[in-house]
Image: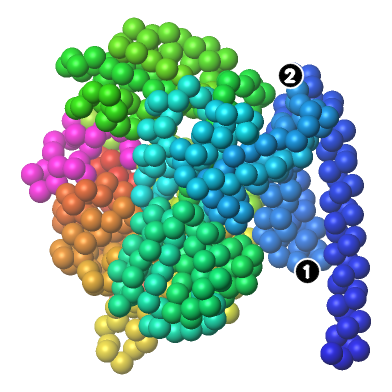
């Protein structure tokens, strides 16, 4: 090692030490703040101050030549931990002895990661004890070997985890918290070997299900179920077998000295698992935090019984977030209903809803009332000026005609059967209804990693949230650049993730839809493909939003009929994009037909955007 490099590394070590000391000093100040917030009138989380702080540190960072988004991301984590730290100290003491937590799996498992995140701000020493099964984890809680337990209950790819629900229905236990963890599955092996040499892959059954598409593409490879992901990684490390691999986290790779062969191998690009914290007795949390209530219902076997029960929530303004049916373990063909909704009985509308709900069901059991966890999602830099809403913009357009008659060629897209404006979410951006102004921008085609990262940075700094780039380009001439294909799509995804943006990209043929859908947040169907009916049907079978551009020579009726093809396949998340039509004008490529927007608002409930490029 050269003296110059050694000197630079020594200086970096000194800076890192100062950073840690500064974080420790900040934490001590936060502890003093927490002591002052025992007054229930003071908010635990000051949203306005956080927003001001994030904007301020971004400007400071950019003044020092740093990337503002990078520094904001670090501070969001610091602020998130600060709120946890303060909440954990309301009514708790560091002198209560160690907190014993029973978890599914060993250290390095996803449940262990969720537990560490959830109890990060605890004033007490936390000790974690791993168990091999769901039942053994709760048995340890019942026997008093642990004060709390944590189990996975729901996954964004494979849905609910039945073992947890079934155990909760039988056990006299209580939910007292939740944690939503971002899951990043990796393929781990002893060395960097080609995928074709792997013959055995082990992991937890849930992880295997979440990576089924990747596993199905492998040849001559056997899948093996293990107790948890970290155990699967440990077994690979102990085996000495180069043909053996595990699906687990990068943390497991570091812990057991394994190599990461491939990252992000789940069926969906973003995977979240919800974990619940369980106790023997209910606990009261700080009511200044947003809450969630979980119920177990038994409804009478009568016409409309469930509907009337759900209506009590709607009538009281309570937002239902989950409804799950599970077969009764005692009575065949009888069902229990698990329900989650926002709020707790300390809120008047929730208390009233619970009282009325009891009169519409055969039995009701409150599984728990606890602080609500919000998954980490990208946030944009605040706009320099207040964004205009779609409602404000619509004041200058023609209001929808309520007497619009349905067209036989399109029923699902018609406003006649759906008078309310639809809202489509692309990543963290809402389009339609009263959603704020949204900016979608990016290059016509992705040409290099540097180019698309520069575009993403510029878009982020301008307050945009959706990065659009062409990876598969339909060109008039076969000799023109056709795009970088899937290589360009990887670059587009990386650039968007670096700046907290959502991705919109075009797909040209039905066979590519599934692969493209794994990397993008929305699929675009270009003007040339507006009436490619096979492609419309293929995108209709996905769960992703579809941005449907108007064809160069298409009428409004034909455009809406094309949207009907997508919705008829079960995908209601369609956004119409006015692209311009061909006229006798030759000075421009297209003539932007803005007059189509008020006509569309009259005929359809779908969101409408305009591409003026």
Is 395 drawn above or below residue 360 in the view shown? Answer: below
Residue 579 tag number:
none
* Magenta region, residue range: 403-422
Residue 285 seen in this snapshot: yes
Quarter of the C terminus within the rendering: bottom left
Residue 59 placement (x, y as % from top left): 76, 57
**Color style of the picture:** rainbow
Residue 52 placement (x, y as % from top left): 74, 43
Quarter of the N terminus within the rendering: bottom right
The residue under the point 30% across, 69% down is: 216
The residue under the point 46% across, 10% down is: 352
The label nearer to you, 1 versus 2, is 2
Majority SS type along the magenta span: loop
Is residue 599 shown left or right of residue 378? Answer: left
Is 435 drawn above or below residue 582 in the view shown? Answer: above
The residue carrying mark 2 is 40
- Helix, strand or loop status at disc 2: loop
Q: Nearer the viewer, residue 497 or 563?
A: 497
- Helix, strand or loop status at disc 1: loop
The residue carrying mark 1 is 65
Which callout, 1 or 2, points at the residue further toward the start of the chain?
2
Is residue 514 shown left or right of residue 346? Answer: left
Q: Residues within 10 Å of mark 1 (few under 14, many from 20)?
A: few
Is residue 26 shown left or right of residue 486? Answer: right
Magenta stretch containing residue 300, yes or no?
no
Residue 505 placement (x, y as % from top left): 38, 67
């Amino acid at each position: 090692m050269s003296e110059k490099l050694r000197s630079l590394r020594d200086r970096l070590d000194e800076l890192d030490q100062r950073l840690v000391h500064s974080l420790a000093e900040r934490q001590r100040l936060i502890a003093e703040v927490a002591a002052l917030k025992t007054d229930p009138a003071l908010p635990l989380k000051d949203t306005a101050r956080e927003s001001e702080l994030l904007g301020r540190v971004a400007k400071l960072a950019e003044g020092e030549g740093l990337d503002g988004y990078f520094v904001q991301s670090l501070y969001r984590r610091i602020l998130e931990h600060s709120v946890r730290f303060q909440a954990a100290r309301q009514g708790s003491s560091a002198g209560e002895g160690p907190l014993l937590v029973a978890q599914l799996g060993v250290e390095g498992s996803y449940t262990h990661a969720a537990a560490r995140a959830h109890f990060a701000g605890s004033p007490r020493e936390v000790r974690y004890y791993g168990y091999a099964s769901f039942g053994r984890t709760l048995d340890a809680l019942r026997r008093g070997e642990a004060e709390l337990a944590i189990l996975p209950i729901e996954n964004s790819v494979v849905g609910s985890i039945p073992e947890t629900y079934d155990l909760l229905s039988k056990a006299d236990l209580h939910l007292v918290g939740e944690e939503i963890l971002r899951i990043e599955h990796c393929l781990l092996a002893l060395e960097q070997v080609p995928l074709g040499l792997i013959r055995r892959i082990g992991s937890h059954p849930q992880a295997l299900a979440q990576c089924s598409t990747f596993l199905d593409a492998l040849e001559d490879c056997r899948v093996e179920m293990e107790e948890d992901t970290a155990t699967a990684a440990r077994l690979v490390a102990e085996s000495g077998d180069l043909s053996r691999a595990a699906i687990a986290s990068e943390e497991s790779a570091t812990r057991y000295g394994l190599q990461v062969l491939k990252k992000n191998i789940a069926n969906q690009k973003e995977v979240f698992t919800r974990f619940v914290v369980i106790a023997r007795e209910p606990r009261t949390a700080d009511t200044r935090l947003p809450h969630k209530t979980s119920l177990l219902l038994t409804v009478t076997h009568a016409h409309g019984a469930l509907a009337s029960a759900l209506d009590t929530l709607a009538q009281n303004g309570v937002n239902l977030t989950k409804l799950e049916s599970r077969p009764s373990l005692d009575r065949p063909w009888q069902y229990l209903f698990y329900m989650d909704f926002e709020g707790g009985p300390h809120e008047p509308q929730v208390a009233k809803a619970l009282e009325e709900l009891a009169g519409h069901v055969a039995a009701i059991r409150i599984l728990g009332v606890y602080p609500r966890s919000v998954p980490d999602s990208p946030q944009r830099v605040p706009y320099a000026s207040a964004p205009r809403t779609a409602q404000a913009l619509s004041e200058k357009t023609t209001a929808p005609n309520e007497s619009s008659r349905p067209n036989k060629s399109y029923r699902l897209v018609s406003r006649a059967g759906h008078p309310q404006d639809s809202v489509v979410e692309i990543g963290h951006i809402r389009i339609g209804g009263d959603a704020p102004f949204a900016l979608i921008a990016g290059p016509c085609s992705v040409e290099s990693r540097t180019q698309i990262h520069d575009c993403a940075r510029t878009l982020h700094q301008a307050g945009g949230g959706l990065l659009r780039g062409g990876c598969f380009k339909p060109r008039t001439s076969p000799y023109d650049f056709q795009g970088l294909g899937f290589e360009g799509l990887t670059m587009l995804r990386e650039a968007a993730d670096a700046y907290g943006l959502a991705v919109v990209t075009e797909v040209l043929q039905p066979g590519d839809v599934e692969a493209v859908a794994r990397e993008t947040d929305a699929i675009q169907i270009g003007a040339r493909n507006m009436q490619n009916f096979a492609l419309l049907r293929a995108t209709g079978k996905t769960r992703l939003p579809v941005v449907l551009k108007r064809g160069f020579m298409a009428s409004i009726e034909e455009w809406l009929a094309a949207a009907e093809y997508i919705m008829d396949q079960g995908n209601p998340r369609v956004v119409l994009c006015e692209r311009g039509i061909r006229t006798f004008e030759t000075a421009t490529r297209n003539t932007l037909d803005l007059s189509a927007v008020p006509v569309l608002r009259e005929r359809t409930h779908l969101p409408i955007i305009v591409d003026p490029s």
